[in-house]
Image (cartoon, grey):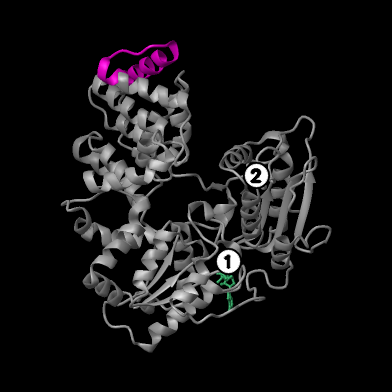
Amino acid sequence: MGGPGAGKTHVALVKARDEIRTGTLKPGQKILFLSFARPTVARIIEKASELISREDLQWLEVSTYHGFAWTILRSHAYLLNGRRDVQLLPPPEAAAHLTDIERDHHDAEKQRLFEQEGRLHFDLFARLVSELLRRSGRLAAIFSDSYPIVILDEFQDTNSDEWALIQQLGQRSRLIALADPDQRIYEFRGADPRRVGEFLEVFQAKHFDFAGENYRSSGTDITTYGNDLLTGANKGKTYQQVKVTRYGFMNGKSLHFSAKAALCSALNRLQTVPDKSIAVLVPSKRLMLEFSDYLSSAADGLPELHHDVAMDAEPPALAAGVIATLLEGGTAGDVASRVLGALHSHIRGRRGGRPTPQPELDLAGALSGFMTTGKVRGAKRQLIVSEVQRISTERQQLQLTGDPAEDWLHLRGLLASSSADVLKQVATDARYLRLLHRGSMLRTNLGSLWRAQGGYQGAEEAVRSALMQEHFAAAQKDWRGIHVMTIHKSKGKEFDEVLIYDGMFQRIARAPDNQRAYAQDLLALRVGVTRAIRRTSILTPKRDPCPFL
Ligand SMILES: Nc1ncnc2c1ncn2[C@@H]1O[C@H](COP(=O)(O)OP(=O)(O)OP(=O)(O)O)[C@@H](O)[C@H]1O
């Protein structure tokens, strides 16, 4: 246990290294390091390669819970549902499927999809693996023999399914849990304040406290500020490396001007720092996208700033589905009907886990109605159908070049120039797709399709499988430069400077009157503040400052 930057991850890796060096692991055995998100996995692998020799690294497996669970389920899920093959249900498709089912019934529907249709929702992973290990002592023994030591990152955020899985693994394997109860920011997905206590009790675990240690921002008062936030002691106190600025409307300038200006100052301060990294942390996805647009513009006399946005997976993935149908081609009628099908999923699923508003559900319903009856009512809906037909005809006449990225951009452009808003939205969402960079597997695969047949037949499947692999491959992130993300996404990361931007309308303290939300938002802010190595700047509206500051 230890606070932000106390060195929990670092010490766990040193421990793994020492275990490997003692030579007690047998051939085929590995130390398993389990984390929640793929970018964190990439980060841990990067840190591990600084501490552990290349030769010894092969004894360490760093994985997400999802990646680990899938290796077990792909070969053994049939023991649970009696079906020969299990198919993954990609989260964007799952979102489109579940969006008009009441939230309370989601779980039952996911279970039904697995049992009756053999389609596996990601949320069932941990639960199913724990059931497998509970019901088959032989499997449990095999997996524990493969992973005699399991390290659990960010243990405070474990939900009940993951906890059940850990308890199975812990019957035979040695567990090392890393936790900071005050970085528990995922209560909405089932993290529980009692979890750390349960771990200590169930396993009678030895407990090491790194309280007061800080290697991330040592010599600064950033961690002190983070801890003061929890008690309110920060109010009215000044800090060297944490600065709070109150901003207001500036006449004739964008609302985001002050935040971008603060970012420019940070870039100036870090001018001579090699490989510098800066995070801009915001309370909501909407503000993230708005601010990202403003950074990319040269408005208000500020320079365009190249940056990375931690976008959700669903909108670009479903938008890619629409473009893939166009790329794949076929007769105009056939393309139009497949585009409508993909558009239907895009409308229903692009909000991820959040419910889709009724008018959009109705629109999706009308489009699928058109596919079966050939009829659609209402001018707006008719426009969408006729635009899809027009673009599909245009696609048929189009001479593509065989350069997948160029052809992709061309088709995206066709959608962007449509007069139907839902098609424009597809083009906008597809801007955030990051699968087509030079040398990527998708680009290579599309290129081979073209070379083999002078066309892109098979593009839909190629895009689908590239998106699926995204869920398991460690996200190779470049941490240099500017990164815009929600405060939640910053967990487990570190940057030279952090800028926290409390929006005028998208607030850090979402609901100051709701005690539970207030406590969670405060913990999230502390996580965000303590990601900085050198300095944290916080911007909050002058007229109504954040109550935590
Ligand atoms: N003993 C140490 N010696 C040198 N550097 C260290 C040591 N412990 C940690 N560090 C460095 O300090 C930084 C923070 O450490 P680490 O990420 O392990 O902390 P943590 O406790 O996991 O943090 P958090 O809970 O905030 O994610 C890292 O850059 C790490 O390399």
Residue denoted by label 1: 181
Seen in the picture, residue 468 relative to 221 is either above or below; the reply is above
Task: State the SS at label 2.
Answer: loop
- The answer to which of 345 and 41 lies nearer the viewer is 345
Say which residue appears at 72% left-offset and 73% top-offset. 219
Would the CB of label 1 be found within 8 Å of ligand 1?
Answer: no
Magenta-colored stretch includes residue 30 = no
Residue 222 image point, x, y percent: 71, 65
Residue 409 appears in the rendering:
no
Residue 123 appears in the rendering:
yes
Image-quadrant location for residue 89: top left
Seen in the picture, residue 247 relative to 497 is either above or below; the reply is above
Q: Which residues are magenta?
A: 370-394
- The answer to which of 367 and 111 lies nearer the viewer is 111
Seen in the picture, residue 536 relative to 339 is either above or below; the reply is below
Q: Is residue 207 left or right of residue 375?
A: right
Say which residue appears at 33% left-offset and 19% top-offset. 394
Say which residue appears at 37% left-offset and 38% top-offset. 98
The amino acid on which the numbered mark 1 sits, given as a three-letter code, is Pro
Q: Estimate how packed mark 1 is, as few (under 14), some (14 to 19) or many (20 or more) residues with alpha carbons within 10 Å.
A: many
Task: State the SS at label 1.
Answer: helix
Give the main secondary structure of the magenta stretch: helix
- The answer to which of 313 and 522 lies nearer the viewer is 522
Picture disc at residue 510:
2
The amino acid on which the numbered mark 2 sits, given as a three-letter code, is Arg
Image-quadrant location for residue 164: bottom left
